[in-house]
Image (spheres, rainbow, N blue to C red):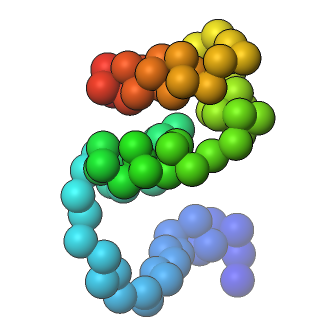
Amino acid sequence: MSKKSLKNLHQAHGKIVSEEITGLDQIFNKESSYKTSLAAKYQDKIGSMTLEELKDIASELGVIPVDNRDSLIKMIRKEFKKR
């Protein structure tokens, strides 16, 4: 085949999409820093994290990672509500 005829070819993946799209992040294939869009699940998740894990998440969100666990959780929750 010549190079000109290769440009006209198209490829299909043939995959059946069975997921229900619930937001723009899924449409544009972007992941949120929060890993979930449900506040209750996120609250439970951050409540069970260690201080080091919370500091890592705070850094990703642009929040200053303080050493007080309760204050850090409050700041992360506040940032979650903004998004």
Could you tell me if residue 62 is visible in this image?
A: no
Q: Who is closer to the viewer here, 16 or 47?
A: 47
Which residue lies at the image location 58% right of the left edge and 65% below the top edge? 7
Q: Position of residue 66 (x, y in %)?
A: 68, 13
Q: Is residue 6 above or below residue 29?
A: below
Q: Quadrant of residue 61?
A: top right
Left or right, 51 with reference to 25: right
- Number of labels in the image equals 0
Q: Residue at x 45, y 21 (%)?
A: 74
Looking at the image, residue 39 lies above or below residue 82: below
4 left or right, relative to 67: left
| Image quarter hosting the N terminus | bottom right
Q: Residue at x 72, y 17 (%)?
A: 67
In this view of the protein, can residue 8 be seen by the observer? yes
Residue 17 or 38: which is nearer the viewer? 38
Outermost right residue: 52
Residue in the image at 65% along x and 34% along y: 54
Q: Nearer the viewer, residue 23 or 27?
A: 23
Residue 77 in the image: x percent, y percent? 40, 27
In this view, the residue in front, 37 or 31, is: 37
In this view, 23 is above or below 83: below
The image quadrant of residue 41 is bottom left
Q: Quick check: 13 above or below 38?
A: below
Quadrant housing the C terminus: top left
